Every structure is written in C-alpha cells, then in structure tokens.
Amino acid sequence: MFGCLVAGRLVQAAPQQVAEDKFVFDLPDYENINHVVVFMLGTIPFPEGMGGSVYFCYPDQSGMAVWQLLGFVTNEKPSAIFKISGLKSGKGSQHPFGAMNLPQTPTVAQIGISVELLENLAQQTPVASAAVSSVDSFTEAPEELIPRYENFQRRLTQNPLFWKT
C-alpha cells in the first residue's frame, strides 16, 4: 500500500505492519538523510474517508523514541516529500505509536504511517520544519533566467561565434 524513498537508496515498498492500521519503514543511517518521500503504491487505496498520518521517529540521546508528525497522504494526495534533516533535535509530539515499543537502534530512524479518519488528519499540525519548499519557489527561479537567456540570444544573433572568445 505504501512506499518510502530516500535519495541514493532503493525504494522501500514493504513496510512492517505493526498494527492493523499502522505501518513502519526503517531508515538506517538516518543522520545522513535530508529528505524522505512517502507515497501510495497505487495498488490499494485508502478506504473512503480515510488517509494516513506520516510520522518521523528517531532515538534521542537516551535511546527513547521521539515521534514527530510530518504530514499526511490521502487518495487525493498520494505522495509527499518531507525534510527531516532539521528534526533530529526537535521535541516529540502526540502520536499513535506510543504503546508499541518499537525497537530503537542508535543509527536507525523510522517513518510511521497511521491510517486515520480524514477529519482527524485535518486537525493535526505537522512540525513546520518538515515542510518542503513549495512549487512556487521552483517556478520562480526560471523567471530569473529569462533575461540571461534573452541576452544570450541577442549576442548569438549578433555574433554566432561569441561564445568561443
């Protein structure tokens, strides 16, 4: 149902199911991860009115699990990119994985997905630093390049070999 991707690593498409409505992916060597992508595989949709809260869990200095809400995925929003590099020193938040006692290893973090009602997802507040830059910031950058490209075209028209000098 879910997949998890870290740049430079193989896709994880088989989470550990720790409860009927809870799934966990292990993230070895998490200190070297900046972003993580969580997505639905497209094989099984959420039941009507349901979605998935996405949590990041890492061991604190004493080895205790610290869970932070990153965001969510739904049938209408089947994937999300989360920045986790700044979360490794933050405070934990309320989470549905509390009584599970999932094993913690000092260099392994986890991504947890909890299947919940959409109305509950709408009331949750993810940690602000997990948000990834909006698409607007990516579309604004090319606009800055237009004057440079126009200048390049003008110079090329005046002298087709200008770039060789």
Image (cartoon, helix red, strand yellow):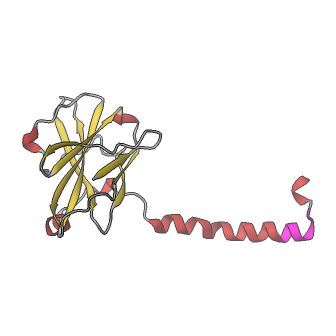
Horizontal and vertical percent for residue 48? Answer: 18, 69
Outermost residue toward the left in this view:
99
Residue 42 quadrant: bottom left
Total numbered labels placed on residues in the image: 0
Asked whether, in this view, residue 23 is left or right of residue 34, the answer is left
Asked whether, in this view, residue 142 is left or right of residue 127, the answer is right
Horizontal and vertical percent for residue 122? Answer: 19, 68
What's the magenta region?
Answer: 154-160
Horizontal and vertical percent for residue 57? Answer: 23, 42
**Residue in view at x 10 percent, y 44 percent:** 98
Between 4 and 149, the one nearer to me in the picture: 4
Query: Majority secondary structure of the magenta segment?
Result: helix
Asked whether, in this view, residue 99 is left or right of residue 138, the answer is left
**Residue in view at x 55 percent, y 69 percent:** 140
Residue 33 quadrant: top left
Q: Is residue 67 above or below residue 46?
A: above
Residue 121 quadrant: bottom left
Is 52 in the magenta? no
Q: Is residue 73 above or below residue 151?
A: above
Q: Is residue 36 above or below residue 138?
A: above
**Residue in view at x 49 percent, y 65 percent:** 137
Horizontal and vertical percent for residue 46? Answer: 22, 62
**Residue in view at x 29 percent, y 51 percent:** 2
Is 158 in the magenta? yes
